[in-house]
Image: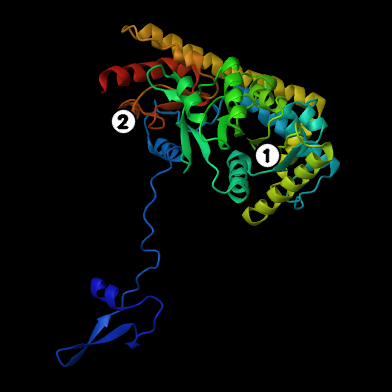
Amino acid sequence: MHEKLKGKVKLGSTTNSTAGFIKTKSFGRVSMVAAVNVSRFEGVTMAPPDPILGVSEAFKADTDEKKLNLGVGAYEPKSYSLMCLMLLRRLAENLMLERGENKEYLPIEGLAAFNKVTAELLFGADNSVLKEQRVATVQGLSGTGSLRLAAALIERYFPGAKVLISSPTWEFPWSEYRYYDPKTVGLDFEGMIADIKAPGGSFILLHGCAHNPTGIDPTPEQWEKIADVIQEKNHIPFFDVAYQGFASGSLDNDASSVRLFATRGMELLVAQIGAMNVVCSSSDLAARCCEVAVIQVKSQLKRLARPMYSNPPVHGARIVANVVGNPALFDEWKAEMEMMAGRIKNVRQKLFDSLSAKDKSGKDWSFILRQIGMFSFTGLNKAQSDNMTNKWHVYMTKDGRISLAGLSLAKCEYLADAIIDSYHNVS
C-alpha cells in the first residue's frame, strides 16, 4: 500500500478522500484504502555519531570501574588547579555584582573590554599591530564560532579562494596539506612545505600551538620557513589559536607563531576561543587607508554575525575582562594556568616512563615527549583503538588520539599496559 500510494499521491496535494481514506476503483467496485502520510523528511538520513562527543556517550554507558575517558579535551575534574580556577571565576563574578554590571544585550561586535584584553593576550599589549590600530576584533561564539565567522568572511569576499587545512584535522570540505607523518609520529615538514607552495593566493589554516589532534608543533625555525613560503606565495595565514597558555604554560611562548607573522607585516586571520581577529597590512598602505580597511572589515564581520547569532553572550566575556583586566586576578590566573600546563607535562612524562619501562620490544616512545598540549597522537590505528575500548575500557577517538588533560598520574601505568597490548597484539 505504501509503495502504491507513494507513486500516486503527491505531497501537499488534495485527494478525493473521506475520513482518512482514499477512494480507488478496483474491477468495477469502489474500495477504501487507508491513507499513508509520507514524511517530507523521509530522505534525511541518520548522521554518524560525533567522533568526540559520541565517545563520551559510550563512556557514560560503560559500568566498568577501570574505564577512562580520553576522548574529549576536558581537564581532569578532581585536579587542584581546576578548583582554583573555579574559585577565581567566583571572584570575578563578585566583581560584576559589586559594579552592578548588567546582562543586557551586547552590541554585535561584543564586549569592548573583552575584545581589548583578548587581542592583547594574543599579540601582546605593546605590539605595533595594536598600537597602529590595524586589528579588527569581534567577539565570537567560542572557538568553533570564531572559525565559522572567518569562513563566512572568506566565502563572501574571496570567492573561489582555496583554503588549505592540515591533514589530519576535523571534518572540513576544504583542501588539505600534509602535516602528520605516521612513520615518525611527527611532523611531515617537507610534505607540508611542498603542499603550501601552490597555488598562490590561498588561505593556509595553521594551529598556533598544540596542534589538534596530533599535539605536534613546528619548531621556531620551521615556523620561520613556513612564514617565508606563505609570504612568497602571497597566501593569507589563518590561525586557529585554541590553547594559548595551556600548551607550554606561557601566554607569550604559545602566541609566538602568530606574533612572528604579525611582525612581518602580513595580513592574517586569527580565531581565538571567543574572538575573531583580522590584521590589516601597513606595509604598502598609508595609515589612513589601513584605518579605513579595519573599520570596513569589522563592519562586515558584524554584518555576517547578525543573522548567525545576532549578539554574543555577555556573562563569560565579563568574567574574562574582569580577570585579565585586574592585575591581581590576572597574575593568579596565569599561575594556575601554568600549573595546569605543568600537570599535563608531568602526565606526559609519566606515560612515557611507563611505556618505556613496560615495553621490552625496544620501540621508541619519545614522540610522546616531543608532542605538546592536551592531546597526544599514539600512532594506534582504528583496530588498535577499538581494542583499547573493547578490552581495556579506554575511550578515545578512532584516529589514535588521546586527551592527556583527562588522565591522572595514577592511571598512567594502566594506560601504558593498554597501549602496549593494542600496539603489539592487534594488527
**Residue on which disc 1 sits:** 275
Judge whether residue 157 can be spotted in this image: yes
The label shown at residue 142 is none
Residue drawn at 50 percent across, 21 percent down: 216
Q: Secondary structure at mark 1?
A: strand
> Of tags 1 and 2, which is closer to the observer?
1
Q: From the viewer's perspective, tell me whether residue 305 is left or right of residue 390.
A: right
- Residue at the (34%, 27%) spot, across then down: 381
Question: In the image shown, does 7 or 343 lie closer to the viewer?
Answer: 7
353 with respect to 35 (left or right)? right
Q: Is residue 93 visible?
A: no
Depth check, front residue: 298 or 210: 298
User: Which of the 4 quarters of the picture holds residue 364?
Assistant: top left
Q: Amino acid at mark 2?
A: Asn
Q: Which mark is residue 390?
A: 2
Rendered view: 165 above or below 250:
below
N-term mark: 1 or 2: 1
Q: Position of residue 15 (x, y in %)?
A: 35, 85
- Quadrant of the image for the C terminus? top left
Which quarter of the figure has residue 236?
Answer: top right
User: Is label 2 in a helix, a strand or a loop?
Assistant: helix
Picture coordinates of residue 361 (x, y %)? Answer: 31, 8
Instruction: Report crowding for label 2: few under 14, some 14 to 19, many 20 or more residues within 10 A (C-alpha).
Output: few
Quick one: which residue is furthest to the bottom in this view?
Answer: 28
Q: CA distance from mark 1 to mark 2?
A: 39 Å
Nearer to me, 329 or 227: 227
Q: What type is the residue that disc 1 sits on?
A: Ala
Answer with the quarter of the image where residue 279 lies.
top right
